[in-house]
């Protein structure tokens, strides 16, 4: 059995070897050399290195991103813990209500403070008015005492007649200038209309009405100069004007005070009217300041003397009325006529600088 297998196997093996040799001899491609077979392995190793490097790069980038995220989270926690750097959060309804309540409480507190300040200012103003009244009473009492202590002296009959003659001339001149003043008033009224100063125009018309009533009264009165004590009373006062001293009696001093009082009252109304019109501070352009005759009846002092002190009072009244204050006077709250303003007695004494003569 073994001998037969061998007899068959060897011829077959020999035939295979011969066939293989024949194929090689016919030009079949021999297997690639070892160098060429190593090329794919090298390329394969290069791709693997690239993948490895790329994976390492991605890992590094991932680590960098994680580090940056951790840093940002840390910074966010720090900002959240800091009240100055904490970003504003939208308030909820409860917070809004609390803020609204705080605003209401703050407004109520401010209103209360304003009311307290206003009440305090009114008290101070009332105190100042009372002080002015007290000073005026003291001045009046002192004057009355001085006049009682002073023996009244009479002038001669000739001097008395000379005074009466001068007063009649002054009154006649005043009446003569009435028509001219009316023309000036109409001219100023036209200017006020052009300037749209309606409040000042209304005031000027009221001033003109008071002037007309005064002139009509003067035209009807028949005055008895002989029984007027001014004309036979000797000078017992001196007053100062423009650095010079002049003499008169107590009746003349009272007329000068009347000029200051009338001027202050009219000036306050004029200044208030200009303030309401939104006009500039300008007391000299007012017709009442230029006229300066309201309250003058042609007696005791010359017209130019009355005009001078009327304007002195007007200027101070205009300032108080324009700025809405009571620096030189106060409102008459002693039962006088409506809208009447009184100049302070201390201001009168300072302007006139009068002194009682004792010799």
Image (tube, rainbow, N blue to C red):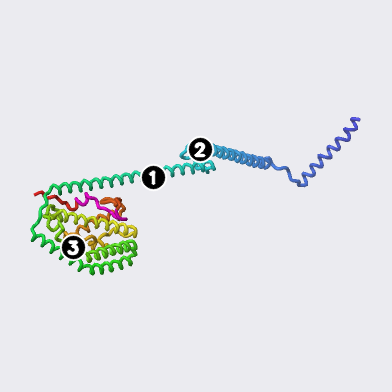
- Helix, strand or loop under label 1: helix
Query: As drawn, is 68 to the left or to the right of 187?
Result: right
Q: Nearer the viewer, residue 73 or 68?
A: 73
* Residue 116 pos. (x, y %): 37, 43
* Residue 27 pos. (x, y %): 76, 47
State the residue at coordinates (40%, 43%).
112
Give the mark nearer the N terminus: 1 vs 3: 1
Residue pointed to by mark 1: 115
Q: Nearer the viewer, residue 73 or 103?
A: 103
Q: Which mark is residue 80?
A: 2
The mark closer to the camera, 2 or 3, is 3
Above or below residue 17? Residue 337 is below
The mark closer to the camera, 1 or 3, is 3
Distance from Cα at disc 1 to Cα at disc 2: 44 Å
Q: Nearer the viewer, residue 341 or 163?
A: 163
User: Is 57 a magenta residue?
Assistant: no
Report the magenta residues as a range: 336-349
* Residue 43 pos. (x, y %): 64, 42
Q: Which mark is residue 223?
A: 3
Disc 2 and disc 3 in contact, CB within 8 angstroms: no
* Residue 294 pos. (x, y %): 24, 61
Image quadrant for the N terminus?
A: top right
């Amino acid at each position: 059995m073994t001998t037969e297998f061998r007899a068959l196997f060897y011829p077959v093996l020999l035939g295979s070897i011969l066939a293989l040799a024949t194929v090689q001899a016919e030009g079949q491609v021999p297997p690639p050399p070892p160098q060429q077979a190593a090329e794919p392995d090298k390329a394969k190793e290069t791709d693997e290195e690239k993948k490895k490097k790329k994976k390492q790069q991605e890992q590094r980038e991932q680590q960098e991103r994680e580090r940056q995220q951790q840093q940002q989270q840390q910074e966010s926690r720090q900002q959240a813990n800091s009240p100055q750097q904490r970003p504003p959060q939208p308030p909820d309804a409860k917070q809004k209500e609390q803020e609204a309540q705080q605003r209401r409480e703050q407004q109520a507190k401010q209103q209360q403070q304003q009311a307290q300040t206003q009440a305090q200012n009114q008290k101070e103003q009332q105190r100042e008015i009372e002080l002015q009244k007290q000073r005026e009473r003291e001045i009046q009492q002192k004057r009355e005492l001085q006049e009682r202590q002073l023996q009244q002296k009479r002038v001669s009959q000739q001097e008395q007649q000379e005074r009466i003659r001068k007063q009649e001339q002054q009154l006649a001149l005043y009446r003569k200038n009435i028509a001219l003043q009316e023309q000036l008033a109409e001219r100023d009224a036209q200017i006020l209309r052009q300037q749209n100063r309606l409040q000042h125009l209304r005031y000027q018309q009221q001033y003109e009405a008071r002037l007309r009533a005064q002139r009509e009264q003067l035209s009807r009165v028949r005055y008895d100069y002989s029984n007027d004590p001014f004309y036979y009373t000797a000078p017992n006062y001196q007053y100062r004007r423009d650095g010079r001293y002049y003499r008169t009696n107590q009746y003349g001093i009272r007329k000068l005070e009347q000029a200051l009082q009338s001027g202050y009252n009219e000036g306050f109304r004029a200044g208030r009217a200009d303030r309401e019109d939104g006009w500039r501070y300008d007391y000299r352009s007012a017709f009442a300041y230029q006229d300066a005759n309201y309250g003058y009846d042609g007696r005791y002092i010359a017209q130019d003397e009355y005009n001078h002190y009327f304007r002195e009072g007007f200027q101070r009244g205009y300032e108080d009325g324009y700025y809405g204050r009571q620096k030189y006077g106060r409102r008459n709250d002693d039962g006088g006529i409506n809208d009447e303003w009184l100049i302070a007695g201390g201001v009168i004494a300072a302007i006139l600088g009068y002194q009682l003569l004792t010799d």
